[in-house]
């Protein structure tokens, strides 16, 4: 019955547990320990997901759903440590990381994305299916207009954000004239505060100093 | 490269790539999440992903994992931070669909100076000049609550026949202008500076007397424990002895090779030549 939580926890509003495993704590553990811990975590996650499903079925709130996040975080950290060890081995022995290779390539729309390579028995020049399935090429003429529009959209969003930030800074200057200017600059790096300060909108309803 | 960061009613055009692999790191950056203060996160003692998940309740979302659906969602971009903690249901109600709040201007602060358990003097209102202990902080709004001071009378449960119960509710005070830290040496309010002591630790120093004002123990309090020493382990926690035990010894082996050796699995087949592309 390890698919379910302990019976005492079924009726509880919250189940208190500790935090997730952190990377430095996992680094001092042997491969065997990590292997065991992985399956402990996997079983725990399975149990939590089962319980979540069960509570959903019964229209009850699932107590302490952050447990799932904690287990997940532990598993991500554990995998990172394992990969770190493997990378060290491969770099020492072969001079490569041994990780799954990938590259930035334009797709059918001419936009770059991270292409994760996969293992094939046939070399690429002989693999027609792969060439046809993965559109790792694009028509420059056809995509040019689209890319222009797309970049314009990105630019407009950026500009809108910049103007919004500037107006917010004006509002802040109006309300808090004795503000910490360094903190303001740190929070809104795109705004030229020295310039904006002289504007009428930045002055509040009080006698300026 | 992508519009995903903005998380508004726009959808990213690289959704068209949905049948192909993506760069995972692009999706981990989230502008809306930056709103939560560090002290709030520390108090919560919850994984960041959980707080994010609880805050970003999508109004509408396409089903994931199907090639025919583009990755679109409608999420409230600017969250309203009020009296409620970001991971609670009350916060979700406050930020529910159709709920609107006036725009809030929060003064940016470089170093937060007042913590839970500090003795402060109130500089405004009816309780001006009185001193009290900080009982609660809301960093997102630069608010502090002082125990039993700066209260408002509120009526609860009033009906036609029943006049209701009257109670005092502490009202928030701005940490920048409305309260001042009290120097414990002479019990008078001062401005403070952050300086480094001989051990290289950052300490608060009273600008008037030059005395160190230690950060109170209560500042370490979280939802789960009052202090780290008083934390009660649950049955599923790894105890400290097990946690700090060093079992790692470096070997010239990958993880898989080591596990295979310890389990007595022998692999002598030679893999055929493969191509990665």
Image: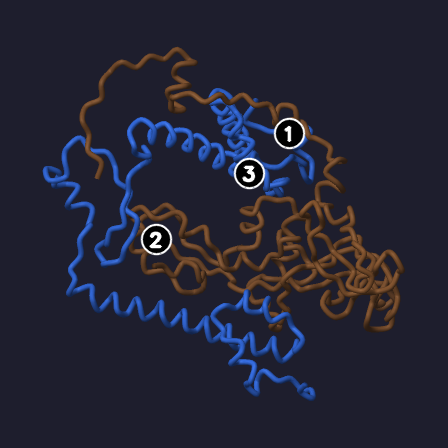
| Tag 2 secondary structure | loop
Please state the chain letter of the residue tagged with numbered disc 3 in the rendered image. Answer: A
Q: Residue at x 72, y 38 (%)?
A: B228
Whether B85 is drawn above or below B244: the answer is below
Which residue bears the numbered disc 2? B69
Residue A116's image quarter? top left
* Chain corresponding to brown in the figure: B
Mark 3, other Cα within 10 Å: few <14 / some 14–19 / many ≥20: some
Mark 2, other Cα within 10 Å: few <14 / some 14–19 / many ≥20: some
| Residue A108 shown left or right of residue B153 in the figure | left
Q: Residue at x 45, y 35 (%)?
A: A80
Residue B256's image quarter? top left
Q: Residue at x 38, y 16 (%)?
A: B260
Residue A141's image quarter? bottom left
Which residue bears the numbered disc 3? A68
Which residue bears the numbered disc 1? B237
Task: Give how far apart the Cα atoms at labels 3 and 2 are.
Answer: 27 Å
Q: Residue B207's x, y, as percent?
A: 77, 63
Q: Residue at x 65, y 60 (%)?
A: B111
| Residue A111 shown left or right of residue A41 in the figure | left
The answer to whether residue A6 of the structure is visible from this angle is: no
Please state the chain letter of the residue tagged with numbered disc 1 in the rendered image. Answer: B
Task: Give how far apart the Cα atoms at labels 1 and 2 are.
Answer: 41 Å
Q: Residue A164's x, y, as percent?
A: 49, 74
Mark 1, other Cα within 10 Å: few <14 / some 14–19 / many ≥20: some
Which residue occupies the extreme front position in the image? B198
* Chain corresponding to blue in the figure: A
Q: Quadrant of the C terminus of chain B?
A: top left
| Tag 3 secondary structure | helix
The residue closer to the viewer here, B116 or A49, is: B116
Whether B42 is drawn above or below A10: the answer is below
| Tag 1 secondary structure | loop
């Amino acid at each position: 019955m390890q698919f379910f939580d302990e019976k005492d926890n079924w009726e509880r509003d919250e189940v208190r547990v500790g935090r997730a495993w952190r990377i430095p704590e996992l680094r001092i553990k042997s491969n065997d320990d990590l292997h065991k811990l992985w399956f402990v975590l996997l079983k725990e996650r399975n149990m939590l997901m089962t319980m979540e499903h069960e509570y959903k079925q019964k229209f009850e709130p699932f107590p302490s759903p952050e447990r799932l996040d904690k287990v997940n975080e532990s598993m991500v950290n554990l995998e990172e440590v394992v990969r770190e060890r493997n990378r060290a081995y491969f770099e020492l022995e072969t001079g490569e990381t041994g990780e799954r290779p990938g590259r930035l390539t334009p797709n059918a729309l001419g936009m770059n994305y991270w292409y994760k390579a996969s293992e094939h028995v046939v070399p690429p020049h002989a693999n027609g299916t792969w060439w046809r399935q993965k559109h790792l090429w694009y028509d420059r003429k056809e995509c040019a207009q689209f890319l222009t529009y797309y970049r314009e959209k990105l630019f407009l969003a950026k500009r809108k954000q910049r103007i919004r930030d500037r107006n917010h800074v004006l509002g802040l200057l109006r309300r808090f004239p004795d503000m910490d200017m360094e903190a303001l600059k740190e929070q809104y790096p795109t705004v030229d505060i020295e310039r904006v300060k002289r504007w009428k909108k930045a002055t509040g309803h009080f006698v300026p100093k | 490269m992508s519009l995903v960061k903005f998380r508004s009613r726009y959808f990213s055009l690289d959704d068209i790539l949905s049948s192909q692999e993506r760069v995972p790191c692009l999706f981990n950056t989230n502008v809306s999440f930056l709103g939560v203060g560090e002290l709030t996160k520390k108090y919560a003692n919850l994984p960041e992903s959980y707080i994010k998940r609880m805050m970003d309740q999508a109004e509408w979302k396409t089903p994931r994992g199907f090639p025919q659906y583009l990755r679109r969602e409608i999420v409230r971009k600017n969250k309203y931070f009020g009296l409620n903690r970001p991971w609670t249901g009350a916060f979700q109600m406050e930020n529910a669909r159709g709920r609107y709040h006036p725009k809030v201007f929060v003064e940016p602060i470089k170093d937060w100076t007042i913590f839970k358990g500090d003795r402060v003097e109130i500089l405004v209102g009816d309780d001006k000049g009185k001193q009290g202990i900080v009982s609660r902080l809301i960093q997102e709004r630069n608010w502090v609550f002082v125990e039993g001071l700066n209260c408002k009378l509120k009526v609860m449960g009033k009906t036609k026949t029943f006049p209701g119960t009257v109670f005092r509710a502490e009202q928030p005070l701005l940490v920048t202008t409305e309260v001042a830290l009290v120097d414990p040496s002479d019990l008078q309010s001062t401005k403070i500076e952050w300086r480094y002591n001989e051990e290289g630790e950052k300490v608060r120093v009273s600008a008037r007397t030059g005395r160190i004002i230690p950060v109170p123990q209560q500042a370490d309090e979280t939802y789960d424990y009052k202090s780290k020493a008083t934390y009660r382990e649950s049955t599923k926690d790894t105890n400290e002895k097990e946690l700090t035990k060093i079992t790692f010894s470096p070997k010239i082996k990958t993880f898989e090779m080591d596990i295979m050796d310890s389990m007595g699995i022998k692999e002598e087949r030679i893999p055929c030549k493969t191509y990665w592309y």
